[in-house]
Image: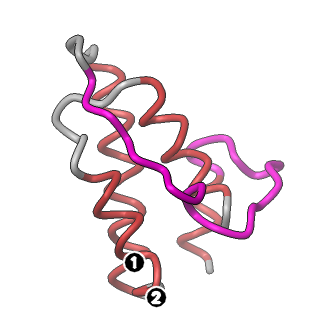
Amino acid sequence: MDYLQKVLQRFNLENTKSVPTPLPEGYQPLPNKSTATSELRAKYQQVIGSLLYIMLGTRPDIAYAVTKLAQFAANPSEEHLNQALTFVATF
């Protein structure tokens, strides 16, 4: 739980409300048709890396959702990042 608190603080999500599922039902992320900025890519990869660590260490039940989002780590969109941050806030 200490790691999770650090992740929530790192991404300024301490005061967000949790949701019952990590991804909305039927969520199908679409590839980003433009090129992500280096800042967006770096932040997205940090969020996904944090989720992968949580998944492997304590929450194997979130594997599908994490790997679905991880598919876009090379060229994420703002929508991908927002969904990943919403996912982190579910904890």
Residue closest to the far left: 74
Majority secondary structure of magenta residues: loop
- Rendered residue at 25%/31% (across/down): 31
What residue is disc 1 on?
55
Q: Quadrant of residue 53?
A: bottom left
47 left or right of 11?
left
Whether 73 is drawn above or below 62: the answer is: above
Q: Which mark is residue 58?
A: 2
14 left or right of 61?
right
Whether 46 is drawn above or below 21: the answer is: above
**What is the span of residues highlighted in magenta in the rendered image?**
9-32
Q: Point out residue 14 in the picture as x, y percentages from the top left corner.
A: 76, 52
Residue closest to the far front: 26
Q: Point out residue 45 in the picture as x, y percentages from the top left corner.
A: 30, 43
Q: Quadrant of the N terminus?
A: bottom right
Q: Point out residue 26 in the picture as x, y percentages from the top left corner.
A: 50, 56
Q: Quadrant of residue 8?
A: bottom right
The stretch drawn in magenta includes residue 30: yes
73 left or right of 65?
left
User: Disc 2 residue type?
Assistant: Thr
Whether 5 is drawn above or below 24: the answer is: below
Q: Secondary structure at mark 2?
A: loop
Q: Quadrant of residue 65?
A: bottom left
User: Disc 1 residue type?
Assistant: Met
Q: Secondary structure at mark 1?
A: helix
* Circles 1 and 2: CB atoms closer than 8 Å: yes
